[in-house]
Image (cartoon, rainbow, N blue to C red):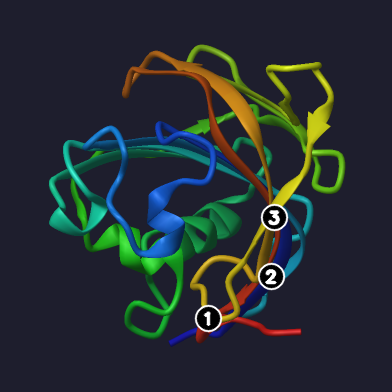
Amino acid sequence: MAYWEFKGRELVNCSCDYGCNCQFGGLPDKGHCHAVFGMIIDEGKHGDTDLSGLKVGAIFKWPGPIHEGHGECVAFVDENASEAQRASLLTIMTGGDTDPMATFFAVFATTVETMHEPVFAPIEFDVDIDGRKGRLRIPGHVEMEGEPIKSPVDGREIRARIDLPDGFEYELAEIGSATSTGTSPVPIELAGSYAQFANLHLNSHGVVHS
């Protein structure tokens, strides 16, 4: 197994209301789970392959709770990645070179029934974790826009965080709102639903705790 480790930043938008029951061991509040994921690796390696500065994304759709499986997924990989970098990113994203169920990539991979061919494309991604703002754009495939939750009473920004000391994705996430639209090969429509903005530090064994 080639060891990997990276530090990065993510923005995720899913179909749940703010809070997302799944973060608390519950079931998705819409009965299904649809999600868009975007991430930039600020620094990282897979074996001897440098992954720093690369961006990835994904669309997931599960017809029921994630643990029941039958999911559909497409992975997007930065077109600027070399062949070696592409192979490394796809290995990590599909749970390879990872302890069993140690990361969200590894967990989700076991629930996906339809894995589309990966798409190598230009990825525009920017995220401000503390500001709860971010944007993912993969032309011809998906767009996601994240922002702070706004009070329906007076429009002020609402700040909330989720702390998961034993999580398999992050330790602490800022919570916001996001809207996503996607077409080929996995259509998706999300509007004003749950979004998480998080710093990630992961390796072959799971979350690297601070």
Image position, residue 19 (x, y; %): 52, 46
User: Residue at 73% of width from left, 17% of height from top?
Assistant: 153
Quadrant containing the N terminus is bottom left
Q: Amino acid at mark 1?
A: Asp
Q: In this image, 206 relative to 182: left or right? A: right
The percent coordinates of residue 43 (x first, y second) are 79, 65
Describe the element under mark 1 as helix, strand or loop: loop
Counting from the top left corner in percent of width and height, residue 147 is at 74, 27
Classed neighbour count for the residue bearing mark 3: other residues with Cα under 10 Å, few (<14), some (14–19), many (≥20): some
Image depth: mark 1 or mark 3 in front: 3
Name the residue that disc number 1 marks: 166
Q: Quadrant of residue 50?
A: bottom right
Q: Residue at x 39, y 13 (%)?
A: 183
Q: Residue at x 45, y 46 (%)?
A: 20
Residue at which label 2 appears: 6
Q: Using the numbered discs, state the Cα–Cα distance from disc 1 to disc 3 in whole angstroms.
A: 15 Å
Tell me the amino acid under the disc marked 2.
Answer: Phe
Marks 1 and 3, the one that precedes in the sequence: 3
Q: Is residue 67 left or right of residue 190?
A: left
Which numbered disc, 2 or 3, marks the residue that appears first in the sequence?
2
Regarding mark 2 in the picture, which secondary structure is present there?
strand
How many residues crowd around disc 1 within 10 Å: few (fewer than 14), some, or many (20 or more)? few
Residue at 65 percent across and 71 percent down: it is 171
Q: Residues within 10 Å of mark 2 (few under 14, many from 20)?
A: many
Question: Which residue is identified by label 3?
Answer: 161
Front one among 79 and 174: 174
113, 69: nearer the viewer: 69
Horizontal side, residue 30 vs residue 38: left or right: left
User: Camera-side residue: 135 or 148?
Assistant: 148
User: In this view of the protein, can residue 117 be seen by the observer?
Assistant: no
